[in-house]
Image (cartoon, helix red, strand yellow):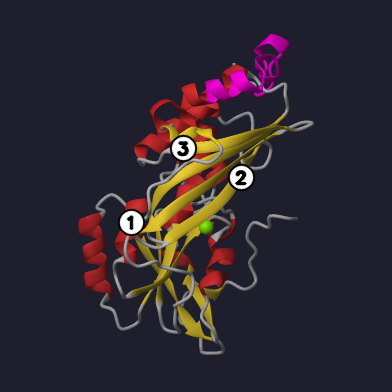
Amino acid sequence: VNDILSRTRSGSVAALGEAALIGRLRLWLGRAAPDAPHGIGDDCAVLPPIRGAGLITVDPLVFGIHFDGRVPPFAAGAKLVKRNLSDIAAMGGRPKAAVIALAMDPRVSVHWLRSFYRGAAAESLRHHLPIVGGDVTRLQSGFVATLTLLGESAGRVLTRTGARAGDRLYVTGTLGRSLATGHHHRFQPRLKEGRWLAARRAVRSMMDVSDGLAKDLRALEPRGAEARVAAAALPRRDGAGVVEALCDGEDYELVFSLAARADTGSFERAWRRAFPRVRLSRIGRFARRGSPMEAGERPLNSLRGYEHLR
Ligand SMILES: [Mg+2]
């Protein structure tokens, strides 16, 4: 029942034809798809003006790369929305509207695609995110859904630049074995947490962990400094070792730096009051290159994360 390709032509998207397929997509999206001109049905969707700075991100979900036949289609559709939401969370932003571009084998099952869209719709509704348009095109084989997400800042936009030598490093949740445990499609994007962090001046830089902490942290490194992590402080997901926690990827957690002068105790207490159920770990610091290592620390430059084009 979960097969992505239909065994019969009558059950495939090819049998539906383009106009009927677009009608079905709208139907499956339900309340997540507003009426034209604010949603699907015109040449463009018309959006209300946004108040803060605009944010835009795009991420695809490719069958065979980001999910496979073991992931239920409802969860795969939800993942398409969530991995983009995680990027908005990483800037401390708020999602505003999304469009979905589909490219797929005409033999894709209508049943399968319905569950995929229902999953995307459920996740969008949860975050008050309207899906306002999209496009459908044919591929020789395979399935690629690409979501473009517009957001707005909720005040300060927290970027990857801004860390300084001496900053402490923190990460939310747990890391490693995301594919093995199903976390890669079950996670919840850290939107509330991201906005809370962006509102705090002592938080100087942030990103979401998608390609593995060891690789991603390099993007936050200030000039002349390197990330040093205490292996014992790494929050590891069930059964994950240190290298898995640092390199596996698809964690969709937030990693950020906190100014050295900030009081870590009161910062951590404020976090626990705001998010009593979300683990927060102080994992290390940005140290000047060449400065002596502290006990238990390791540099990350020998480790690799997920490479997209290898
Ligand atoms: Mg990201």
Q: Residue at x 61, y 35 (%)?
A: 135
Q: Let me know if residue 182 appears in the view.
A: no
Residue contact at pointers 3 and 2, CB within 8 angstroms: no
Q: Residues within 10 Å of mark 2 (few under 14, many from 20)?
A: some
Q: Which residue is mark 2?
A: 60
Find residue 280 and report its horizontal and vertical position in percent.
Answer: 34, 60
Residue tagged by mark 3? 131
Q: Secondary structure at mark 1?
A: helix
**Quick one: label 3 or label 2, which is nearer the N terminus?**
2
Rendered image: mark on residue 193: 1
Rendering quarter of residue 113: top right
Q: In the rendered structure, which segment of residues is drawn in magenta?
A: 4-25
Q: What is the spatial separation of the Cα atoms under label 1 and label 3, in whole angstroms?
A: 23 Å
Q: Which mark is residue 146?
A: none
Measure how far apart labels 3 and 2 are at the Cα level.
15 Å
Q: Amino acid at mark 1?
A: Glu
Q: Is residue 270 visible?
A: yes
Q: Is residue 166 left or right of residue 308?
A: left
Task: Quadrant for residue 210, please give it.
Answer: bottom right
